Amino acid sequence: DLVEFSSVRLSCSVSSGSSVSFLWLNSSSEVTASDRVQLTDGNANLTIVSVTRYDRGPYKYLTMSLDACHIPSISMQLTIHHSESSVILFLCFNQLSVGPENTLLAKSPSQENYLEGSNIRLSCSAVSNPAALFYWLLNGSLLSDTGPEFRLINVQLSQSGDYSCQAFNNQTMIIQTSQPSFISVLSKFEEKDSDTLTLTCSADSTPSATYIWKLNETETLTSDRVQLTDGNANLTIVSVTRYDRGPYKCDAFNAVSNGSSDLLLLSITKSPSQENYLEGSNITLSCSAVSNPAALFYWLLNGSLLSDTGPEFRLINVQMNQSGNYSCQAFNNQTMINQTSQPSFISVLNQNQSSQWWTISLLIREVIG
């Protein structure tokens, strides 16, 4: 097979003593001599210097003699197909080896962070003839997996890193590596809505370390529901909500050096049947209805109309005396029709009722100090 930027010679031989004329065509255009194209021996030989993929043809050769044409450098014998009038017409298709080029890596699903246990599919593509062979690398080290797809099933924290793919053409002997794609695998912790959670950070350190907690790469400050204790080593979240999922990271440092924990992402769940909320929680109720013109919305507690209107109703820092059946009423001021939703019961519990405490420890892997 031809390799791009090499030279190729197409030649045609005729029986001894034959008197013929030769004409080379590339598709339907006559091939003429140029800087890269040479016609020799009465046009019987066509040489292309520094061949590229755009020179692949098809080439047509026309003569008044019946014989065999061949391309010695490719070692391919071509058969000439001819008509009864002995006009010879054949196609020369150059099998040109090119690439690989434009080696690209894609990941699915396409995101920055993945939870432990997720499934990730990486795919690699490249422009190459013949088709490239694909190899996979993690942080620059070759993995045992080959092929255009690489799957991470039930991915773990230890599999975080820079993934890249390598395309290899065994004819051109060219290797091209894609740009790396970083995959960050985060710890997964199942937490129930309204539980209390404590994250603990520790490090082997001399002198003692100072700790900083970060949420989404920003410093986490103390608020009504977030408490930092024991020299900031412990972070406690009271009455956890779905908005507290993180990711969280602990940084430890002293006068000598510093270190960081792995990222921790909480998976906060609330069962559909759960209707209990701790005092101090924030609750948002929303109402929708099919209406033209748009409906006006009103809110009811235990059947009694509240002063709040609009498609959303918020209970901020909810208290026990706000427990009850909440419903919304949609009213169309053109049709004068109103419709009330099914009630939804909200039970507000004292902080000491049905509260679960969870403690998670994050360890700084490096010894600092």
Image (cartoon, grey):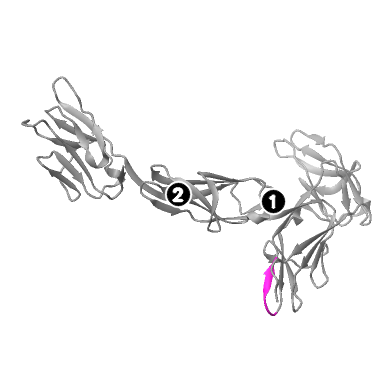
The quarter in which the N terminus is drawn is top left
The quarter in which the C terminus is drawn is bottom right
Where residue 256 sits in the image (x, y, percent)? 68, 79
Number of the front mark, 2 or 1: 2
Distance from Cα at disc 2 to Cα at disc 1: 29 Å
Is 191 placed above or below 252 here? above
Q: Amino acid at mark 1?
A: Glu
Q: Which mark is residue 229?
A: none
Looking at marks 2 and 1 on the same chain, the residue that comes earlier in the sequence is marked by: 1
**What range of the chain is rendered magenta?**
255-260
Q: Is residue 28 visible?
A: no
Answer with left or right where residue 5 lies relative to residue 155: left
Q: What residue appears at the point 87 percent right and 50 percent down from the top-left corner?
A: 277
Answer with left or right where residue 64 lies relative to residue 192: left
Q: What residue appears at the point 23 percent right and 29 percent down from the top-left corner?
A: 79
Q: Secondary structure at mark 2?
A: strand
Where residue 153 sits in the image (x, y, percent)? 64, 45
Q: Which mark is residue 167?
A: 2
Residue 56 occupies quadrant:
top left
* Residue linked to disc 1: 116
